[in-house]
Image: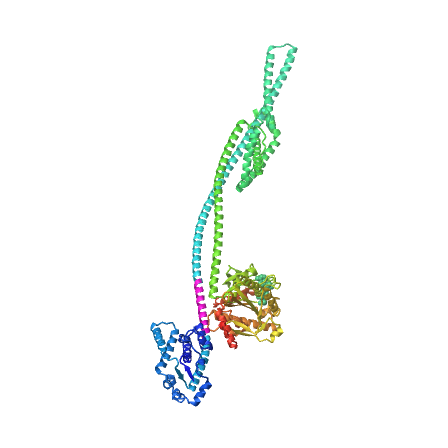
Amino acid sequence: MHLNSRAENIPMSLNFLGRKLRNHSVAPAAKQRAWEGTGPSRCADENRGGLSRVVRKQPLVCVQNELPGSIQELREEMRHQPCNVHNTHLDQENNAGVWKRGGASWLRKSRIKWKSFKRWMSLEHCTEQSKAPAKDLNAATINTREREREDDVPADMKIFIPYDSAKLCITQIADDMVAMKSRHLEMVQELEENFLIASRENQERMVDKIRTYYQNKLNALKMVLDLYQEKVERRSALWEEKIKSLRSINERLQDEQIALHERNRHDSATWEREKSRMMELFSSRLDQLHHHQTSTLQELQMARMEMGRVQEMLQTSKDAKESEAKETESSDSAAHLDGAEARLEELRESLGKRQYEISMLIDGGGEGGVQDSVVPSAYTRLLGAVVHQAHQVYAEVTEAKQQFDQMAEENRKAVAGASVGAKYYQDNQTVVDSIEPRSLGMNPSEVRLRDQVTQAEVNRKKHEVLLVAVECIKAGVTPTLTGPVSQDDLAELDEHVKSFEERFKNSGDLNSEVGKRVGQQLLLLQAELKQVKEENKKMTEHYAAERTLRKKYYNMVEDMKGKIRVFCRIRPQTRAELLRGSTTIVSCLDDYSVILESPRGPREFQFDRIFTTEHTQDDVFQESSRLIQSAIDGFNVCIFAYGQTGSGKTFTMLGDREQKYPGIIPRTFNRIFEIIQENETKFEFKVLASMLELYNDRLQDLFVSPAESLSKRIEIKKDKKGLVFAQGAEAKEATSAGELFALFELGSANRHIAATKMNIESSRSHLIISIMLESRNLANGSMTYGKLNLVDLAGSERAAKTGAKDDQLKEANSINKSLSALGDVISALALEQAHVPYRNNKLTQLMQDSLGGNAKTLMFLNVSPSDCNLEETLTSLIYASRVKAITNHAQRNMESKEITQLKEVILRLKSGQTVEEEDV
Ligand SMILES: Nc1ncnc2c1ncn2[C@@H]1O[C@H](COP(=O)(O)OP(=O)(O)OP(=O)(O)O)[C@@H](O)[C@H]1O
């Protein structure tokens, strides 16, 4: 067998290539070239690197074509002329390892100069070197020189290789190829690992970057918030100062008001005094009038008496005149008679005048006395003004009221006292009257009696007038005055009233001016106070908004840190509790603090959010819906409700039976498909759901009938990413919220429910709904896998309290066992213990990737507000407080397009399928 000198390069090159590939991590393209280099099509491909470069100048002629004859021919030849090469030392030397050292002896025997062979070898080596980037100029120069030398080699030179050696050589080539193939597979694996590591590192770097970015953002926000807070505090201080000053102004004004009031009181006292003085004046005037009337009456009587005397005289003179006329008429008696008649006339006149005056006095007016048109109006005006003002004082000032009442009482007593005198006067009127004619010659006892009677009458009248005046003031009615009033009296009274009115008016003006000023100031103050209040309100709102924002960012950070969020929901009192007369012992301090009134005093607990009876199902869902987006973004999300039996877990998670108030689960179904719809142009989604129930320590698939479920064995497993899944349970695909809800209803029909002693329908199993959310980015093909666990835990309860027996007792024990296992896991996680007892119970196993794992977790703590549940509520609150301390390590389940493809290739290789070039 012989080979063309150029063709000889081929096996040697392959050997080199094999070695080279083994010691080099090759890029897929290079690997592909290397693969192609070993394939049968390599002869045709001149333009590829490596081996083909050596033969670029002279096209490579295929080995088979260059061979002088067929193997048969060679064998023939060897039969006639035993191959001396075959019988040379080659085999021995080969056995002794000479082959490996270069096989110099057989080369010599084959008449090939060692030098030439070495040159070929070097040439090949240099050619291999030239595949790598030509770093060294010398190497290129050597290469050129070697090629020049190669041109010296005779073109027809043949090398004879013994058949066994050739066989050996070919066997080795075959081995090399097999080794190369396995190496290639190793490389693929290596590549895959490298890709995985690189992508993981990349992801971690990204997460770190995002974390730093958000941390910086948060710090900036914190700074802004601090600034705001400072501003708010400064403004609060400013407003407090303002309020303080306003308060002091207010106080000052109040003092002024009090002083004014005092002054008013003082003025009214003065007015009182003035009024009583006026009353006295009135009464004295009335007395005077009365006196005047009495004296006029006396004068009248005297005039009557004188008239009687004069008439007597006239009668005597008439009688004398008649007797004289009978006897003789004398001139003296005629003169005497004329004088008497004049006197009579005079007396008549005087009497007429007096009678008129008396009639005026008695009738209260009349021509010739006081002017009828002036007196009543002046008095009415005067009295009207005085009484009106006095009545105002009486109505407004309590003390004045008392005084008036007292005055009325005193006058009434005085009138009563004076009436005795009057009665005496009436009883003795005849006596007194009989005294009158002899008044000029009265004895002292008679005069005293008459004076006493007159004084008593005067007093009575005076008090009667005062009483009438007081009563009129009290009633606000102007008294009607009868009797004559002189012009002087009127003028004096008028003046008096005018001055009083003036003073009153002045004081009123003064008061009204000050009052106006005070009122204006008060109005200003009120306006300012209103403004301050509004600003305060705004500031409070602003502050509350800032606080909420702060809390939101804090929550975001907590989310990023992976803290488990705990929301506490206080349900309203049930009918049963109300009938029992239970009182409410749980109250909410603000959005984040809850207070429990325990026998040892109030205990405060802090949570991420508190929901009271005023919060609707929608409010509760709004706070939780952010997590649904996270699940679609590729996080593990778990929302679960914890609490004693009947505390409202099912109401929170599922809603009421009629779905009038749907809970988190049905709302989540809708939200998932809303988000999907919003993103369907960018992503392709797949939604799979499974529904399990953990009942009496046994996992049951709720998507199959209970009978079928009994025959199924469901095991909790973890996939490569550490995600928990239930092997053996059905995962059904849903393409709409309606489909998902229909699946949920199918599962709900198979749940275990019982009624407790309190007659509340109670779920006796833990319900776990898992929704797997796969999304493929249509732009780059990357895949994300999110998982949303919605868990309605069975209620924790005290068997003794609920009156459970037999099966129900067993159920209760199983529930309590699993909840206590959950408690142990929470404790271990909160204390960051090395070992977390997830495997103690199926519930904790199932929730492993939701608690302290790769998840975002939200726990609803449902509590009853009634005192009859105090113990359970306290335990639940303590339990949930521990949960808040747990930190998860939320990570996105995402892989790049390459990883996804490589995984597919590996799967196909494993299953023995062929892999196309473009797949890799
Ligand atoms: N926030 C609420 N508003 C109005 N009613 C509520 C509220 N929470 C609970 N309820 C009512 O209280 C009762 C008990 O609630 P629910 O069945 O949800 O409790 P639970 O904790 O799920 O009980 P169990 O663990 O026994 O299943 C129900 O009648 C429910 O309608």
Residue 262 appears in the figure: no
* Residue 313 falls in image quadrant: top right
> In the displayed image of the protein, which residue is found farthest to the top?
328
Ligand 1, seen in the image, is in the quarter at: bottom right
Residue 916 lies, in percent from the top left, at 50, 73
Residue 900 lies, in percent from the top left, at 50, 70
Residue 383 lies, in percent from the top left, at 55, 33
Extent of the magenta region:
190-213
Residue 897 appears in the figure: yes
Looking at the image, residue 289 lies above or below residue 272: above
Total numbered labels: 0
Of 43 and 432, nearer the camera is: 43
Instruction: Label the magenta part by its dominant secondary structure.
Output: helix
Of 818 and 664, nearer the camera is: 664
Q: Residue at x 54, y 27 (%)?
A: 487
| Quadrant in which the N terminus appears | bottom left
Taking the image as shown, residue 800 lies to the left or right of residue 234, namely right
Q: Is residue 456 magenta?
A: no
Q: How is the image coloured?
A: rainbow
Looking at the image, residue 114 lies above or below residue 891: below
Looking at the image, residue 573 lies above or below residue 719: above
Residue 294 lies, in percent from the top left, at 57, 28
* Residue 81 falls in image quadrant: bottom left
Looking at the image, residue 637 lies above or below residue 59: above
Of 281 and 229, nearer the camera is: 229
> In the displayed image of the protein, which residue is found farthest to the left?
138
* Residue 481 falls in image quadrant: top right
